[in-house]
Image (cartoon, rainbow, N blue to C red):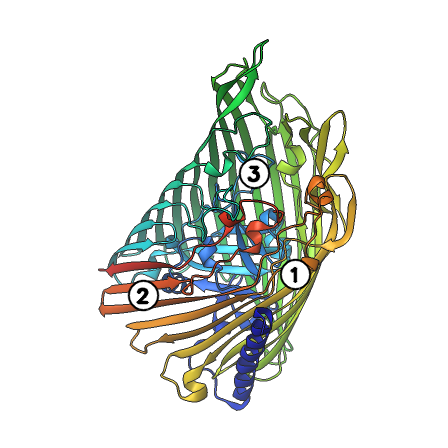
């Protein structure tokens, strides 16, 4: 039997097992153990709700999940979330989230409701920025809201939202009275030879609470499974890397009286990495008699934030609760590339070594003000929870490139320039939402509407002379959702929602010229229109004593999709430009479930079975480097059919437990791959994109408390030492690419940690 057939058989059995067992809970008592659908979400409506009460699909990961599953980065975070992946390009590491085929800046990332910096990419490896500026040791919950969510989250939520919530002092302290808490944690991961140390201090003295968390990480490159390519000509191992990360979270919160609470938050994260780009040696088609000789990268990223908040329980005529926040945030990416190459010099040509530094800095600074209010209204036939608010933001973007020649036989000039102008964006958004309950709370209908406006402005200086006129965008977006509880166990939900995404300043103004035999010219396009989307999502849920289950179907349509489009070759210059394209659609099915085996079949108390499945497909309009349009072509950002099956046990004493997880991923069907982004010379030679084979991997984690205040945690990952590729990492690479082994995932690896709480 083929791997695909085995996967489909097990998927069917898993779904049937959970659905059948949960159905038997129809006449059962209410759940005595929390289920997946009993988790709390805030991102869906900006008010606290159980997952089984919202009209959208949301995945919640808690701090407890992060610790037990030994999560070290955002890639680990979504390891068991089908339909959600993370991209990794090697040099800059784990970058952007992909939710149901929407990735990069189409997915909104927030930390404590503060928007995170944008990602950007270019044709050159030293001009890239990812969005991974979060340390998970400081996070108490992560919510992944799938599908367009602009009505409550504004622009950039056209593909979904990943909302991080940082830990508070109260998470470590007793509910009342003066108290203190200290913990020390150390861990090691063999996949990247990473050592992690975290110290946590929390205190309450009277009405003042404080928290300080410091984390230090030292790591190497993430190992690949294989060595050299089968030809022996390309490097199959990851490029050597040294990484150091410092992260600090500090909080002060003061309960002024019964109605008012204020707080101050400070975050600082600094990452430095040095990479020997061995994979670049000999990889550049220069025509020189000797290959490129040396490439080194010295990169750093930094994020710092200061935030204030004030919570007020007023129960006034206009609002019952009010919360305002004010945050300053600065994010910076600095990439320094040192290279040596052979250049032809002199009237009697000879080859000499040229060496240069490329120092690129990209910085985003923002001020963000948020105001959110709620009001309860009770009427004879319905109850209303009205929420409304205002968001104001000013964001400044700055980039600078310095090229310095250390060895310069060809007489090239040092250069300081910008790839895009200095830019400032002022934005404002207002939303209004009403959660209306009918029929003794069996039916909840949630309409919502939002207005957004954006005004980008650019400046010229000595490093960027091209002037652009000021732009402005505005948009209304709405949603309408409903949840109906057929019984105490079964419910159904449906939602229509709209998404809205303003063009990235990088896409509007970025200009790059790469001098080659045929130069590459990425041209700016200040006239880009905002992206828009419409989404329909329907689902059924069961939530009872035996467990919970949810099955969801969705259909998303995107207009004015922004993609990099080839414009052809003019005067030996290959021109590209970001443009708006229409007719992009994504549809799919998802299932997740949990079955308490102790209730269903008398297994030891605390034993559960979990499963999740995600399938989707998409198509759009694209073009190749000849300028040929491909309509109704497959959308390459769609991940293959994925399923996760797990068996978990948590002892009633909470002293020990573990989890066994089996991840199954189908092969990427060649008919579901667009070759529009394969270079024309590859296409003419019969080239096509590499299609990842299917795979199954097994992971196991366990924790044990030998004494009350000490927790030991260990995990073994990819136990069967399977060689496999993630589709998101290799999409766009041709089958003829010699370095495919460099994109394989780690083989068998382990992680351990010990935590001491005082």
Q: Are marks 2 and 3 in contact (CB under 8 Å)?
A: no
Q: Are marks 2 and 1 in contact (CB under 8 Å)?
A: no
Looking at the image, is mark 2 or mark 1 nearer the viewer? Answer: 1
- Judge from the rendering whether residue 508 lies leftward or rightward of residue 418; answer left or right: right
The percent coordinates of residue 206 (x first, y second) are 27, 57
Q: Residue tagged by mark 3? A: 394
- Disc 1 crowd rating (10 Å Cα; few below 14, some 14-19, many 20+) is few
Q: Are marks 1 and 3 in contact (CB under 8 Å)?
A: no
Q: Give the position of the C terminus as an image quadrant.
A: bottom left
Residue 127, image quadrant = top right
The numbered dot on residue 175 is: 2
The percent coordinates of residue 458 (x first, y second) are 63, 29
Looking at the image, tell me whether mark 1 or mark 3 is earlier in sequence order: 3
Residue 752, image quadrant = bottom left
Q: Residue tagged by mark 1? A: 669
Q: CA distance from mark 1 to mark 3?
A: 44 Å
Looking at the image, tell me whether mark 2 or mark 3 is earlier in sequence order: 2
Looking at the image, tell me whether mark 2 or mark 1 is earlier in sequence order: 2
- Residue at 39% across, 71% down: 659
Q: Secondary structure at mark 2?
A: loop
Whether residue 246 can be seen here: yes
- Judge from the rendering whether residue 680 lies leftward or rightward of residue 101; answer left or right: right
């Amino acid at each position: 039997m083929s791997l695909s057939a085995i996967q489909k058989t097990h998927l069917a059995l898993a779904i049937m097992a959970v659905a059948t067992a949960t159905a038997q809970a129809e006449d059962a008592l209410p759940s005595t153990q929390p289920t997946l659908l009993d988790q709390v979400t805030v991102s869906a409506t900006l008010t606290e709700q159980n997952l089984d009460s919202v009209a959208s699909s949301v995945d919640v990961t808690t701090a407890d999940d992060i610790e037990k599953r030994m999560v070290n980065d955002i890639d680990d975070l979504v390891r068991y979330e089908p339909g959600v992946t993370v991209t990794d390009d090697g040099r800059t590491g784990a970058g952007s989230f992909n939710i149901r085929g929407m990735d990069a800046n189409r997915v909104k990332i927030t930390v404590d409701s503060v928007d995170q910096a944008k990602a950007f990419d270019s044709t050159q490896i030293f001009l890239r920025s990812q969005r991974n500026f979060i340390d998970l040791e400081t996070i108490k919950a992560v919510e992944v809201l799938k599908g367009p969510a602009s009505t409550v989250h504004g622009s950039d939520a056209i593909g979904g939202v990943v909302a991080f919530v940082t830990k508070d002092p109260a998470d470590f302290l007793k509910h009342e009275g003066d108290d203190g808490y200290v913990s020390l944690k150390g861990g090691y991961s063999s996949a990247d030879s990473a050592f992690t140390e975290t110290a946590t201090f929390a205190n309450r003295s009277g009405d003042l609470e404080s928290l300080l968390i410091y984390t230090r990480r030292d790591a190497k490159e993430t190992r690949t499974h294989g060595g050299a390519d089968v030809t022996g000509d390309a490097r199959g191992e990851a490029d050597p890397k040294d990484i150091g990360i410092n992260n600090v979270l500090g909080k002060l919160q003061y309960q002024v009286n019964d109605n008012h609470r204020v707080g101050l938050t400070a975050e600082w994260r600094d990452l430095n990495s040095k990479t020997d780009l061995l994979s670049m040696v000999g990889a550049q088609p220069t025509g020189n008699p000797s290959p490129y000789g040396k490439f080194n990268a010295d990169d750093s990223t930094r994020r710092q934030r200061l935030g204030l908040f004030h919570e007020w329980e007023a129960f006034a005529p206009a609002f019952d609760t009010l919360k305002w926040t004010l945050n300053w945030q600065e994010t910076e990416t600095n990439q320094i590339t040192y290279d040596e190459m052979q250049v032809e010099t002199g009237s009697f040509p000879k080859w000499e070594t040229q060496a240069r530094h490329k120092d690129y800095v990209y910085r985003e600074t923002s001020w963000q003000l948020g105001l959110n209010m709620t009001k309860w209204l009770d009427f004879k036939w319905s109850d209303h929870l009205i929420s409304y608010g205002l968001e104001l933001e000013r964001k400044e973007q700055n980039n600078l490139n310095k090229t310095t020649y250390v060895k310069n036989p060809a007489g090239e000039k040092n250069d300081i320039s910008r790839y895009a102008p200095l830019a400032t964006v002022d934005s404002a958004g207002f939303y209004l939402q009403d959660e209306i309950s009918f029929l003794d709370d069996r039916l909840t209908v949630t309409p919502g509407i939002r207005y957004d406006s954006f005004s980008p402005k650019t400046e010229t200086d000595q490093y960027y002379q091209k002037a652009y006129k000021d732009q402005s965008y505005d948009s209304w977006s709405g949603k309408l959702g409903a949840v109906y509880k057929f019984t105490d166990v079964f419910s159904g939900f449906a939602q229509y929602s709209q998404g809205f995404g303003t063009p990235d300043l990088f896409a509007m103004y970025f200009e790059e010229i790469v001098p080659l035999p045929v130069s590459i010219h990425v041209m700016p396009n200040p006239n880009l229109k905002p992206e828009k989307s419409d989404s329909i999502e329907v689902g059924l849920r069961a939530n009872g004593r035996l467990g919970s289950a949810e099955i969801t179907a969705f259909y998303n349509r995107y207009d004015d999709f922004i993609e990099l489009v080839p414009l052809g070759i003019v005067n030996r210059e290959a021109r590209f430009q970001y443009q708006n394209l229409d007719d992009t659609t994504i549809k799919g099915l998802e299932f997740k479930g949990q079955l308490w085996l102790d209730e269903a079949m008398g297994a030891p108390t605390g034993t559960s079975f979990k499963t999740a499945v995600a399938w989707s497909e998409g198509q759009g309009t694209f073009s190749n480097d000849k300028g040929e349009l491909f309509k109704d072509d497959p959308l390459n950002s769609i991940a293959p059919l994925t399923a996760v099956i797990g068996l978990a046990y948590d002892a009633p004493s909470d002293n020990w437990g573990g989890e066994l997880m089996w991840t199954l991923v189908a092969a990427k069907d060649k008919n579901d791959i667009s070759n529009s982004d394969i270079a024309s010379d590859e296409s003419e030679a019969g080239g096509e994109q590499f299609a990842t084979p299917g795979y199954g991997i097994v992971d196991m984690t366990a924790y044990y408390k030998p004494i009350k205040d000490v927790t030991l945690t260990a995990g073994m990952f990819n136990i069967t030492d399977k060689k496999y590729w993630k589709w998101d990492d290799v999409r766009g690479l041709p089958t003829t690419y010699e370095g495919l082994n460099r994109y394989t995932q780690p083989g068998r690896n382990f992680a351990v940690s010990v935590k001491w709480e005082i």
